[in-house]
Structures are given as C-alpha cells and as structure tokens.
Image: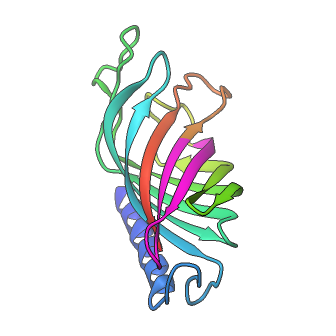
Amino acid sequence: MRMAYRTSAAILIRATLALYAGAPCHGEGLPLCADCDLLIGVGTTYRTYHSFGWTDGWVLPLTLELDDSRWELGAFRFATAQRAHDVNNPPASGDAANPYWGFTAMRRWQVLHRPWGRLYLGFGANYRTEIDYLEATRWNFAWLAAVRFPAGRSTALELGIRHWSNAWLKFPNRGQDLLTVSFVF
C-alpha cells in the first residue's frame, strides 16, 4: 500500500515538473497553463488544541495553483512523526501522527493586493492517507491564510498557515495544523 502512495506521489511530482519545464518566468505561467503557478516549499506542524505548541513534524508541500491562484491542488508529504502533547489522554506511542501523505483541493480568494504583497484566504477539502491521533477521518475540510511577497523578477515567496479538520463530524477531532514557506515559480 505504501508503494502505491510513493508511486502516485512520484507521478504527481514528475507531471507537475514536466508541466513547468521551460516556463519563462513568474507571471507568464507554465508553458501548458498561462495562469498557473507551481509552489515548492517546506514547513512544520504545530498544535492549537488545548494550547499552542510545536509538534516537531516536517512537511514538504508541492502545490499547483490554477486560474491566477484561484484554485489549488496540493500534495503534502509529512516526512517525520509528530509528537503529541495531550497530557490528559496521550497516545500509547507518544506520537500524534506517523509520516503520511495529504492531498488538497481548494478555492483561493485574493483579499488584498499591494505592491509589497498579496493576501489569500482559501477553503476546500483534503484527504489524508492515514487515520491517527489527530484525525478520525481521512477526508477533512481545509482552510488557508497566506501572504505572498515578491522575491525577484521571476519568483515570489509565500508564507501559509493551514488547518485540516473534520469539523467534529467524528470524534476525536484534534486537527492538523501546518506552517509552510513556499517558493512560487
């Protein structure tokens, strides 16, 4: 089963990079999609249930934005286990989540456009390849708040805060929280 996820991720990454190959610069889009952007980044996980705290999880996001950043398709590799901090009901292993894949489909709205940057809000759905201490369901709601700064003539830098949650449709619902930094091509 894990091999299928690795193969799917490899196909997604290769297809995205093939789509991007030879793109002239940011603002002119990808060769096969004039209004698309590719975001490649790194991030970490944290928790907001009970109180704020870092969970020491590393995440590698790869997202494709379509139609001038109005839509997002993303693949997120949670590369390390995440620690649990719930002192009242900790998991037996001490880990809140093992490494896994998450995929999102999201509608994004640009709510601020200034010379120094842009502010985006997004809402959509996500799929997780495992059920764990953080989430009782594979399918979840997803939201995003991101700010994008120009980082040169052909790139930008985006700082994003994301939350994945099943909105208490099934218990427990601790949620998955991410902080990501991505280069926009």
Quadrant placement of the N terminus: bottom left
Instruction: Find residue 26 and report its horizontal and vertical position in percent.
Output: 52, 79
In the rendered image, which quarter is residue 104 located in? bottom right
Instruction: Establish if 133 lies above or below 24.
Output: above
Q: Can residue 130 be seen from the camera position used here?
A: no
Residue located at (49% from left, 88% from top): 23
Q: Is residue 111 left or right of residue 175?
A: right
Report the front residue among 63 and 89: 63
Residue located at (43% from left, 60% from top): 182
Instruction: Establish if 36 lies above or below 102.
Output: below
Magenta span: 139-162
Report the front residue among 41 and 93: 41
Report the front residue among 167 and 29: 29
Describe the colour scheme in one phrase: rainbow
Residue located at (39% from left, 48% from top): 100
In the rendered image, which quarter is residue 168 located in? top right
Q: Is residue 23 magenta?
A: no
Q: Can residue 144 be seen from the camera position used here?
A: yes
Instruction: Establish if 42 lies above or below 183.
Output: above
How many numbered markers are drawn?
0
Q: Is residue 153 magenta?
A: yes
Residue located at (44% from left, 80% from top): 17
Residue at the far top in the pictured view: 88
Instruction: Find residue 180 and report its horizontal and vertical position in percent.
Output: 43, 50
Instruction: Find residue 42 and report its horizontal and vertical position in percent.
Output: 36, 55
Q: Magenta stretch mostly in which secondary structure?
A: strand
Instruction: Establish if 178 lies above or below 105.
Output: above
